[in-house]
Amino acid sequence: MTWALLGLGLAILAAAAYVNYVNLAEAFGPGPPHYGRTTNMDKWSDPIPFLLAIDAAAVAALVVLGALLWRVRRG
């Protein structure tokens, strides 16, 4: 049970990190935001609020898993 909870926590952490990386790389790209994308800047939206919500959900899930792991380990 302990290893399963640790694995689930790592999976949640990895998924949140992947979502953050993909969205930030797509939004900001490899350089200043105006390189090659000036025609679509009117359609650009800031991904930070969405990512903050994802990160808050991941942190909440990790806190719940940590509390459950604490209960399991204490017996």
Image: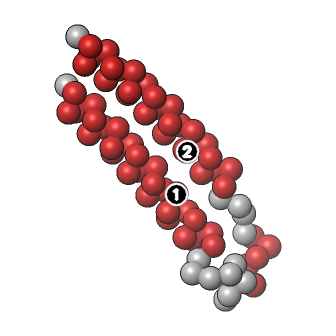
9 horizontally vs 23: left or right: left
Q: Are marks 2 and 1 in contact (CB under 8 Å)?
A: yes
Q: Which residue is mark 2?
A: 54
Q: Nearer the viewer, residue 43 or 11?
A: 11
For mark 1, does the 10 Å Cα neighbourhood hold few (<14), some (14 to 19), or many (20 or more) residues? some
Residue placed farthest to the bottom in the image?
Answer: 36
Distance, label 2 to label 1, CA atoms, is: 8 Å
User: Label 1's element?
Assistant: helix
Amino acid carrying label 2: it is: Ile
67 lies above or below 62: above
Residue placed farthest to the top in the image?
Answer: 75
Give the quarter of the figure containing the N terminus: top left
2 lies above or below 45: above
Seen at 43% across and 25% down, the residue is 64
Q: Which residue is mark 1?
A: 20
Give the quarter of the figure containing the C terminus: top left
Colour scheme of this structure image? secondary structure
Q: Nearer the viewer, residue 24 or 36?
A: 24
Q: Residue 30: which quarter of the image?
A: bottom right
62 lies above or below 11: above
Residue 3 % position (x, y): 20, 33
Seen at 59% across and 77% down, the residue is 29
Q: Residue 48: which quarter of the image?
A: bottom right
User: Label 2's element?
Assistant: helix
Residue 11 % position (x, y): 33, 45
Q: Earlier in the sequence, mark 2 or mark 1?
A: 1
